[in-house]
Image (spheres, helix red, strand yellow):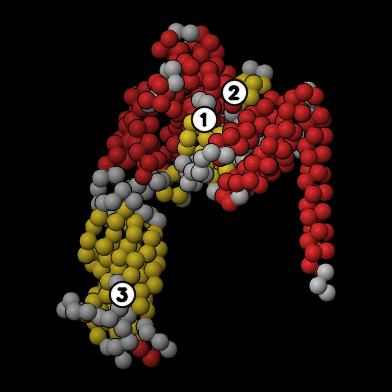
Amino acid sequence: MRFRVPVLLCALVGALALASTASAATLAQNLTRVGVPAATKQANLDSVARAKSTAKKLGGTRAQAINAVVASLTKMAGRAAFTPDLARIAFLELDSNTTYLSSHALPSSGTRIRIDGVVYESYTGQGLRIQPLGTYFAILEPGQGIVSEGGVGVAMTSAQKIVLAVGDNNDLPYLFPYSGTQPPWYSAMAEGVAASAGISVWNRNGDDQYLDMAIRFGNSALADGITVENNGLWFPLYVSKPGYRVLNGHMQTVLAMSDLADATGDDGFADAFNRSVAATKAVLPKYNTGGWGRYAIGEDAPVKYMTLMATQLKELGDITGDATFTTMGQAFAADLKTPPVLTGPTKPVKPLQLKKFNDKPFVKLLIKRDKPVKLTIRVTKKGGGASGIGPFSVDVASGSGRIKITLPRKKGMYVIRADAKDWAGNRVKNVLLAAVRVKG
């Protein structure tokens, strides 16, 4: 019996070695299948070997990150969408992870860093991943980092390394699994931002190569747009999820169509702008709770997107002269500074009979709120004295819903009040929601 564990360990190590060898063989076969030249294929396989060796030495979260990049690359190589040009970008991402993580800690999830002119974002369990949207937003709204790298022209040229040129289009692939979607996947918003960035650089230095880049990105965004009601045009944030209508992502690309139409005089871009403006206006009421904005239908917008949407809407209003956009943009900006509005039931709550409850009595109170808030609910006696219940806090979305509130197992009249704080930090205090009588 004493020899059983070593034998099993040897078998396990052998199985893992065989699996690793099979994986490498499959990757090599797929690189050959899509036509990667022999010398490049060998360099790619050397990159994988270097990544695995580095991961083994590092251990911990850095090893997990590098191995995740290897795994997604290997799986993607077996898909029909894999090409030599896509392989070039994928191995750039892998090499960047190996090099950076060999001498740096893994940044916390959501952190973005620039490596050789490309923005990478850290995703939990996924490593550092090329962020096309972040890369081109940095060029569109350049900070000191872009300036120190040589300016927007240099940055735009450097970012070409993450571009997948397909015909007259410049596609921007994302190379990691996300929200149930397998790579490569695409975002019309990223392409729209890249188009606007190209036009911005062209306006600064007059070099037509950047206008050409912008047009190619615009072509990609147009190809990813979807026709909606009344021949409107919608630009999906995630091309693989056309039904998920994210307002800020769509509007950013709408603004890019305006940039392109102005810069080129092209009727196709002008038509896309007009159709997408019409589609935006048609659905705007669905994105407004009356006190907050929606990120997507039924989904409250985080503060940073509220701020972005307010700016986008006001810009659309300036371009089109349509007060509908300006008014909602101003409303969203105001929502970020005004306190929440809470209301309780419109009718008195019926008395509760203690004998109907095995434990403490409770009421499911209908509470309406115009914003997403953290509610702090308090139960007091009628005169304001302590009831022995709560307070307790709960996070709720905008809209209305019933919240279970426990009352003392003792006869009397109890008052339910609440404080609320919205996501921007605005507060309202001591709102009377209901009075409830507990009877014997």
**Residue where numbered disc 3 is placed:** 390
Residue at the spot x=62%, y=21% of the render?
A: 169
Q: CA distance from mark 3 to mark 2?
A: 57 Å
Q: Amino acid at mark 1?
A: Ile
413 shown above or below 245: below
Residue 242 at x, y = what percent? Answer: 58, 39
259 shown above or below 370: above
Residue at the spot x=38%, y=26% of the render?
A: 143
Please give the label number shown on residue 349: none
64 shown above or below 113: below
Q: Amino acid at mark 2?
A: Lys
Q: Nearer the viewer, mark 3 or mark 2?
A: 2
Q: Amino acid at mark 3?
A: Gly
Task: Bin the neighbour count of mark 2 within 10 Å (Cα to Cα): few under 14, some 14-19, many 20 and up.
Answer: some
Q: Nearer the viewer, mark 1 or mark 2?
A: 1
Task: Bin the neighbour count of mark 3 within 10 Å (Cα to Cα): few under 14, some 14-19, many 20 and up.
Answer: some
Please give the label number shown on residue 115: 1
Please give the label number shown on residue 161: 2
Residue 50 at x, y = what percent? Answer: 68, 37
Earlier in the chain: of badge 1 and badge 2, it is 1
The C terminus appears in which quarter of the rendering? Answer: bottom left
Residue 382 at x, y = what percent? Answer: 19, 79
Residue projecting furthest to the front:
2
Could you say whether the residue bearing mark 3 is in a helix, strand or loop? loop
Residue 302 at x, y = what percent? Answer: 40, 46
Could you say whether the residue bearing mark 2 is in a helix, strand or loop? helix
Q: CA distance from mark 1 to mark 2?
A: 12 Å
Residue at the spot x=78%, y=55% of the render?
A: 13
* Dot 1 and dot 2 residues touching (CB under 8 Å): no
